[in-house]
Image (cartoon, helix red, strand yellow):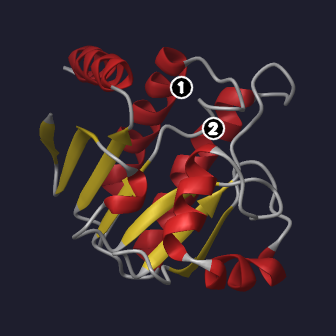
Amino acid sequence: MEVAIGHVTLEVVRGNIAKQEGFEAIVNAANAWLRHGGGVAGAIHRAAGPGLEEECRPLAPIKPGQAVITGGHNLPNPYVIHVLGPVYGVDDKPAQKLADCYKSALRLADEKGLKSVAFPAISTGAFGYPMEEAAEVAFKTILDTIPQLKRVKRVRMVLYRKKDLKIHERVLKRVLGERG
């Protein structure tokens, strides 16, 4: 699914976040210490190689909603933007912290002059955020942030599983419909 929002193309695709060729940055759903982990963080660190974790060390720890940027190392992307999403049912104000992840990552990409960013579904794995609720927060935040972006022209949401892709497509259509 692809939709033009002002000067930005928003895409929703099925795929592997660590294999997003043609994107200047991918977003890592990181842990606070920016270390190799499971899920998205594990996939990105495995693909990037040990240099990524080494570059991350002095940047850690990060707080929920915060974004930091590193090189992409062995990834097909020059940069990785790392964000720490909220743990659902544990962190207070999870929707605000999840929204902050998307806002912070997009603003950081824009400040760095990047034209394209690919996101995973932040906090929906081990951090337990319900997929549909997370998709709504993600898309509302992305749509609200797009008018402030000067350099970013492409934003992609990458879903690993087919059922997650279907949820995101449905939620995006609903959010766009609510906005007219």
Q: Give the residue type that dot 2 points to.
A: Leu
Residue beneath disc 2: 98
User: Residue 75: where, in percent of width, then height?
Assistant: 42, 75
Q: Is residue 147 above or below residue 143?
A: below
Q: CA distance from mark 1 to mark 2?
A: 8 Å
Mark 1–mark 2 CB contact (< 8 Å): yes
On-image quarter of the N terminus: top left
Q: Give the residue type that dot 1 points to.
A: Ala
Secondary structure beneath dot 2 equals helix
Secondary structure beneath dot 1 equals helix
Which residue is more in the foreground, 166 or 10?
A: 166
Task: Compare marks 1 and 2 and give the one earlier in the sequence.
Answer: 2
Which residue is more in the foreground, 100 or 39?
A: 39
Q: Is residue 128 above or below residue 104?
A: above
Kindly identify the residue that appears in the image at 37 percent across and 49 percent down.
16
**Which mark, by number, is residue 134?**
1
